[in-house]
Image (cartoon, rainbow, N blue to C red):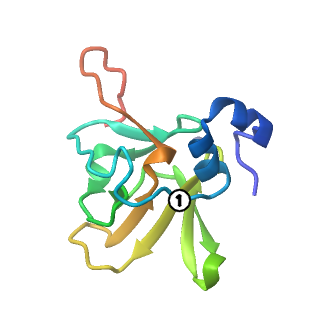
């Protein structure tokens, strides 16, 4: 797979901290209930990729799943790419940032959450950065 942002592992190591590198570039997982955004809720704003800053999820996509990681029922159009992940003898759907290929987490379907898609994007907080909308400057215009 190739992505628009083609930085090498060495280049990523220079801009990411150890934990970000482990999760984004080596497909790690943070401990449940440990992430900075697990219980983070905001009316407005956008979650961007912690690696390349591409916008991934809007605040309104987030819901309380109780699973221990930030959960989203949908992503910004085209922002995340899905792959089949057969690691650990399971068939799961891995999600990565469409811009840099950074590992975000997995998508689970049909779990019965009361959301419009019945999908749960289970994302590591470490893979994300939150930026609140700033109505003063109109910085975020993607409404
Ligand atoms: Zn990215």
Q: Quadrant of residue 47?
A: top left
Q: Point out the image quarter for the C terminus.
A: top left
Q: Point out the image quarter for the N terminus.
A: bottom right
Q: Residue at x 76, y 52 (%)?
A: 2
> Where 20 sits versus 134, above or below?
below
Q: State left or right for residue 83 relative to residue 130.
A: right
> Where 42 sits versus 103, above or below?
above
Q: Residue at x 41, y 62 (%)?
A: 121
- Residue lying farthest to the top in this orientation: 137
SS label for mark 1: loop
Could you tell me residue 26's position as x and y percent?
Answer: 67, 55
Q: Does any portion of residue 61 appear in the rendered image? A: yes
Q: Does any portion of residue 102 appear in the rendered image? A: no
Q: How crowded is mark 1: few (under 14 residues within 10 Å), some or many (20 or more)?
A: some
* Closer-to-camera residue (15/143): 15
Q: Residue at x 34, y 61 (%)?
A: 68
Q: Report the image quarter containing ligand 1.
A: top right
Q: State left or right for residue 9 relative to residue 68.
A: right
Q: Which residue is drawn at 55% across and 76% down?
A: 92
Could you tell me residue 74's position as x and y percent?
Answer: 37, 58
Could you tell me residue 122's position as x and y percent?
Answer: 42, 62
Could you tell me residue 65's position as x and y percent?
Answer: 27, 65
Residue carrying label 1: 29
> Could you tell me how many numbered marks the image carries?
1
* Closer-to-camera residue (72/27): 27
């Amino acid at each position: 797979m190739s992505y628009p942002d083609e930085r090498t592992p060495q280049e990523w190591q220079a801009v990411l901290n150890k934990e970000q590198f482990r999760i984004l570039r080596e497909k790690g997982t943070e401990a449940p209930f440990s992430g900075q955004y697990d219980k983070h809720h905001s009316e407005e704003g956008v979650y961007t990729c912690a690696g390349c800053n591409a916008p991934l999820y809007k605040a309104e996509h987030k819901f309380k799943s109780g699973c221990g990681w930030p959960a989203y029922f949908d992503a910004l159009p085209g922002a995340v790419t899905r792959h089949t992940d057969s690691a650990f003898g399971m068939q799961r759907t891995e999600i990565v940032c469409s811009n840099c290929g950074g590992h975000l987490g997995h998508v689970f379907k049909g779990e019965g959450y009361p959301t419009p898609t019945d999908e749960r994007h289970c994302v590591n907080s470490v893979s994300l950065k939150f930026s609140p909308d700033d109505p003063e400057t109109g910085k975020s215009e993607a409404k």
